[in-house]
Image: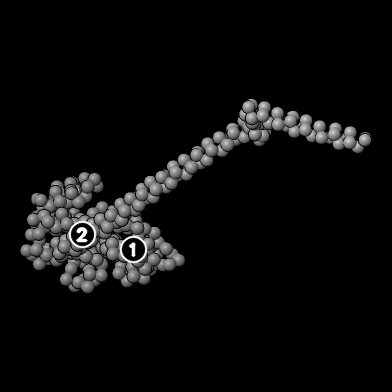
Amino acid sequence: LAALARGPLGRASVAMEGSPLSQFVILAQTAQGRACEALVRQALEHSGVFVFGELLDCPNVQALAGAEESARLLELLRLFAYGTYPEFMARKAQLPELNAAQRRKLQLLTVVSMASKDRLIKFTDLQVALDVTNARELEDIIIEVAYQNLIVGKMDQEKQCLEVESSTCRDCREEDIDFIIDTLSAWEDSATKMLTSLDGMVQYSHDCHEKQRGQREELEKLIQTTRENLKEGGAEKAGGDGGCTRMPPDDADEESKRAKGTRGRWMGSMGASSRGSKH
């Protein structure tokens, strides 16, 4: 490993901070044998590399399967790409030992795998999966997972659980592709049904709006008609001289003559009655 650091791979590793995985993939195109093994170990320890699919696909890395010791390292790389810490513990005898950095990274990746399946993870389940008994160490792992932007969530100390909002993706096996397709297809169907439902709600809202607008227009017309009728009625009363009915001129003259004739006959009869009384 020290020789690798002094050689071309070591000089190139200085530039890994920009895009760590791509740099490892470039170096794997020429690294063979022991140099390739050292490159894989560097990738497993690097703090900025959490996916390994592209590195696994490199022919020189696949060639590590030709020797027993390097084949164990290749299996460890596959475990980091797809597996979890409990899987490592179950196969510990067939895999190389983990140093502290590799152990911590595999623990972080295990949290990511658990977060991709459940949105509420109990601390007790995390302690079992990560093989930690100290609550402080578990909190440090969760904080580091969030700091590395591998998950977004928060710790609920009262409920003793990790609440996950989202998580990053890990490498997927070829056998997982069908499951991914089925999941995406189910999501598409659900989204299509939701859009259809939303379109129906929009149409219903539009119909209700049009119906309400029509009713409002009818009401406004009725109000306007009523106002006009009230105005016309008020004008007729104002023109009727306080409510008294005026008679046409000819009818007024005739009525006056009749009144005078009646008054004359009444006065005449009164005078005759008076004279008769005196005799």
Q: In which quarter of the image is residue 244?
A: top right
Disc sitting over residue 242 in the figure: none
Relative depth, front residue between 15 and 268? 268
| Rendered residue at 33%/50% (across/down) | 203
| Rendered residue at 35%/66% (across/down) | 121
Q: Where is residue 61 in the image (x, y as percent from the top left)?
A: 11, 57
| Rendered residue at 10%/67% (across/down) | 68
* C-alpha distance separating marks 1 and 2: 22 Å
Disc sitting over residue 119 in the figure: 1
Q: Is residue 103 above or below residue 28?
A: below
Question: Could one spot residue 169 in this view of the protein?
Answer: no
Q: Outermost residue toward the front?
A: 279
Q: Position of residue 194 (x, y in %)?
A: 29, 56
Q: In this view, does 87 lie above or below 102?
A: below
Relative depth, front residue between 71 and 270? 270
Local secondary structure at mark 1: loop
* Left or right of residue 156: residue 188: left
Q: Disc 2 designates what residue?
A: 185
Q: In which quarter of the image is the N terminus?
A: bottom left
| Rendered residue at 23%/59% (across/down) | 189
> Number of numbered discs present?
2
Relative depth, front residue between 174 and 15? 174
Circle 2: residue type: Ser
Q: Quadrant of the C terminus?
A: top right
* Left or right of residue 70: residue 235: right
Relative depth, front residue between 9 and 197? 197
User: Which mark is in front, 1 or 2?
Assistant: 2
Circle 1: residue type: Arg
Mark 1 / mark 2, whichever is N-terminal:
1
Instruction: Give neighbour class at mark 2: few <14, some 14-19, many 20+ (Cα, 10 Å).
Output: few
